[in-house]
């Protein structure tokens, strides 16, 4: 039996995922860094993680595509051992606009990347962790967003709605898996300094909006990683279906 703790963090070549990879490594986990495009950044994360003395691999896979998710999990099985924790962290947004200007291609891309990927990775994690399939249990943490509560009007309702779906997934799946030794929880970050905002067309978005945050500042990726780690660890052993806001008071 593999007693080593193994975590897959989807979308961990940068941002919150990369910070989480380093935090889990510092706690002794073997880590799979997943990415879609940016191999150089993923390999930099791997270098930092390996420097902490734990095993780490980078696997390129578009987690919205089932065959790629299957390949990703098979590679983890053979190179790190079966996973004990899954952090569904991938999330994308596109240029700020009102719903009336969105087309189906954009909406479907947001929904498949932000929602289908969480369902697919959970499916392959369950097949390995669930008592029903001979596993030893485990944890799933879904990274949502404060946008699930605000709806992101005039900016990206599609993104916000995708995160609302993730909160519902967390609640439903936590109940579906409670008897199978798997806890499912979520984290809703607020405005965090990452490159994601540049993808939405406004690199300085956090600084523009930070005075509207009760704590009067944007969040750092490490502050989100702490909540993700706590929910994935045994320290949160009586929590499932819980969603933690890391939003500076918003
Ligand atoms: P980020 O810096 O934009 O990083 C996104 C990561 O996802 C990258 O590593 C990217 O890899 C990867 N990725 C994108 N599409 C992928 C796919 N189809 N398959 C595999 N990997 C893929 O994002 P972040 O700001 O750290 O956000 C992380 C999570 O927190 C997301 O779920 C986001 O919605 C949520 N969140 C962020 C904020 C914020 O203010 N930053 C606020 C609330 C919630 P490549 O670059 O290699 O493609």
Image (cartoon, rainbow, N blue to C red):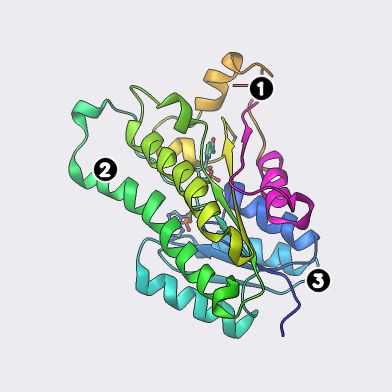
Characterize the local packing of mark 2: few (<14), some (14-19) or many (20 or more) Cα atoms within 10 angstroms. some
Q: Horizontally, is 178 left or right of 198 in the view? A: right
- Residue 135 x/y as whole percent: 62, 77
What is the C-alpha distance between the residues marked 3 and 2? 42 Å
**Quick one: label 2 or label 1, which is nearer the N terminus?**
2
- Which residues are drawn in magenta? 222-248
Percent x, y of residue 212: 57, 14
Secondary structure beneath label 3? loop
Q: Residues within 10 Å of mark 3 (few under 14, many from 20)?
A: few
- The answer to whether the beta carbon of the residue marked 2 is less than 8 Å from any atom of ligand 1 is no
Q: Which residue is identified by label 2?
A: 107
Q: At x 20% / y 29%, what residue is drawn? A: 101
Q: Is residue 116 left or right of residue 128?
A: left
How many residues crowd mark 1 within 10 Å: few (<14), some (14–19), many (20+)? some
Find numbered disc 2 in the image and state the secondary structure of the residue it sits on: helix
In front of the other: 147 or 34: 147
Q: Quadrant of the N terminus?
A: bottom right
User: Please, what secondary structure does the residue beneath circle 1 have?
Assistant: loop
Image coords of residue 184 (percent x, y): 58, 53
Give the residue number, with chain letter if any, for mark 3.
53
The span from disc 3 to disc 1 (Cα, nearest Å) is 34 Å
Please tell me which residue is depicted at 38% across the width and 42% down the height of the picture. 162
Whichever of callouts 3 and 2 sits on the residue coming sooner in the sequence is 3
- Which quadrant of the figure has residue 207? top right
| Marks 3 and 2 in Cβ contact (< 8 Å) | no
- Residue under label 1: 217
């Amino acid at each position: 039996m593999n007693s080593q703790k193994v975590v897959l963090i989807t979308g961990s070549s940068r941002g919150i995922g990369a910070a989480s990879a380093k935090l889990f490594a510092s706690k002794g986990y073997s880590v799979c860094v997943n990415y879609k495009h940016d191999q150089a950044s993923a390999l930099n994360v791997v270098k930092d993680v390996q420097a902490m003395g734990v095993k780490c691999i980078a696997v390129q896979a578009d987690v919205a595509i089932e065959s790629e998710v299957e390949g990703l999990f098979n590679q983890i099985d053979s190179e790190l051992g079966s996973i004990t924790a899954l952090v569904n962290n991938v999330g994308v947004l596109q240029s700020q606009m009102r719903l009336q200007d969105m087309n189906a291609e954009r909406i479907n891309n947001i929904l498949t990347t932000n929602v289908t990927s969480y369902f697919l990775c959970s499916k392959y994690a369950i097949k390995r962790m669930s008592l029903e399939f001979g596993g030893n249990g485990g944890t799933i943490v879904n990274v949502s967003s404060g946008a699930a509560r605000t709806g992101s009007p005039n900016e990206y309702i599609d993104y916000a709605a995708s995160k609302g779906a993730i909160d519902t997934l967390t609640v439903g799946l936590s109940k579906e898996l409670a008897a199978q030794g798997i806890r499912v929880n979520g984290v809703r970050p607020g405005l965090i300094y990452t490159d994601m905002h540049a993808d939405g067309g406004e690199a300085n978005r956090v600084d523009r909006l930070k005075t509207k945050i009760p704590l009067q500042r944007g969040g750092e990726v490490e502050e989100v990683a702490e909540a993700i780690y706590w929910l994935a660890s045994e320290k949160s052993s009586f929590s499932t279906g819980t969603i933690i806001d890391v939003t500076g008071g918003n």
